[in-house]
Amino acid sequence: MNAFQREDKGQVASNFVVIKMLHYRKVHNFALIIAFICTIVLPCGTIAKTSQKSAAKSSQLPPPEATPEEIELGKQAANAFEAKEKLVTDKELINRLSEIAKRIASFTERPKINYVVKVIDRQTPNAFTFPGGFVYVTKGLIDLTDSEHEIAAVLAHEIAHNVLRHALRAMEEERKLAPAIIAAIIGATVSSSEFARQLPLIVASLIDAVMLGYSRKFETEADIYGFNYLLKAGFNPVGMLTVFEKLEKVEALKYGGQTLWQAYNATHPGLRDRINWVKDKLNELGIPIIRRGVVSGGKAEVEEEKIGDKIVGVVKVRSIVLCRLASLSEGLEGTKRAKFLAEKLNKLLDAGLRRYEVHLWTDGSRVAIKARGEILLEVTEEDAKLQGVTKQQLAEQWLKALTNIFLAEQLFGSD
């Protein structure tokens, strides 16, 4: 029995839900963090080939739609949970999440489950699901994402938990539910009277099972299935990778490098293992790891700046100044040069440009920075005169600034 398992088993069923929910409230904040580790941080661990076999064996699935018992159980659990939580009422956001969930669900083994997605007004990154299609995501996790691909990665994992009945199976494995009750819930038996009689007890145990997380086996299954759902539904699975990386950074910053899940590695794979697993899977499938496709990267932008009596075009990425471009004697304004450079740089960055693909180039009196064999930015006499340096020196300054831009993109997780 772990530290969160309750000691009120002797209470009668009619009081069980109230007692459990009160106890749940005391540990709720920490439970959210643990659930973040166990439920949404989409595991990888050292995912061996046996995980694939385990996932396949678990796929003795119930009907394609949610059974009435699953829906009733999920509804009761959702009502009990929502009584303690504040929900976000942004209709546009909820509709967007619901559409993504619907799109993913249509490619699962249970395509007729109607998913209801709601957002909890909490900043702790977290997500979980109750049987019957009730999915919850915290505002903190939504705020951490940059694209529908990252949101889809979160929802695909939770939908996989639902499809594979992990909450119910976890309760069965812990002997909190008799096999007969499980059979009634998944519609394998005609009579569900025993299920109805024990509903209060089941609801309380269900909330515990979901909030306190799943085993390594179940989490691995949810990752395998969730990854495949993303591919089938047409989402970029690199979003799963970037979500892991963001969560790792959040926890490393919050806990000084000693992340909570490190203490739970015996049953819950660590984020670094998960990151490595997704990378390996992407490489195995030949999917390029271009993070800017799923994460909002820094965009090259143009500003005007006055130096003495001259107007120059300034190109920035985030807050880093790449270059200041002078107007040319033939009439090409510095701002127009800057806009042309910004457009070209953004296309290259979006296409996955790397620092090693950029270098200085000289040919006689010409000095430039090349990217992927093409001139990205050529230094002119006017540029060098404006800065009071040689063309070679200015090109080196610009290359150093470009290096800092690449480093910044890595820091923000978009490279």
Image: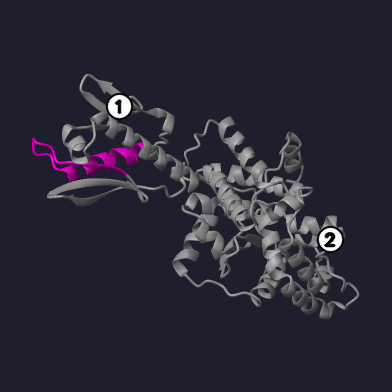
Which residue reaches farthest right?
10
Q: CA distance from mark 2 to mark 1?
A: 60 Å
Helix, strand or loop status at disc 1: strand
Residue at the image point whose x is 71% and y is 49% from the top: 219
Residue at the spot x=67%, y=43% of the render? 44
Could you tell me which residue is drawn at 82 percent across and 70 percent down?
193
Find residue 75 and name its label. none
- Against 4, is 318 above or below? above
Q: Is residue 184 left or right of residue 386?
A: right
* 112 on left or right of 296: right
Residue 186: percent from the left, percent from the top? 75, 58
Give the camera-side residue of 186 and 317. Answer: 317
Type of amino acid at the residue the image marks with label 2: Asn
Question: Which residue extends farthest top?
Answer: 364
Q: Sort mark 1 into few (<14), some (14-19) or many (20+) by Cα contacts within 10 Å.
A: few
Query: Which mark sits nearer the N-terminus, 2 or 1?
Result: 2
Q: Amino acid at mark 1?
A: Glu
Q: Quadrant of residue 185?
A: bottom right
Q: Is residue 226 above or below residue 364?
A: below
Task: Residue 349 in the image: state x and y as whole percent.
Answer: 38, 39
* Of the pair 155 and 392, the residue shown nearer to us: 392
The N terminus appears in which quarter of the rendering? bottom right
Disc sitting over residue 374 in the figure? 1
Splitting the image into 4 quarters, where does residue 322 fall? Answer: top left
Range drawn in magenta? 322-348
Q: Is residue 311 left or right of residue 296?
A: left
Label at residue 2: 2
| SS class, disc 2 | loop
| Nearer to me, 251 or 136 | 251
Question: In x, y percent, where is residue 299?
Answer: 35, 47
Q: Can you tell which of label 2 and label 1 is closer to the viewer? A: 1
Q: Position of residue 415 (x, y in %)?
A: 46, 41
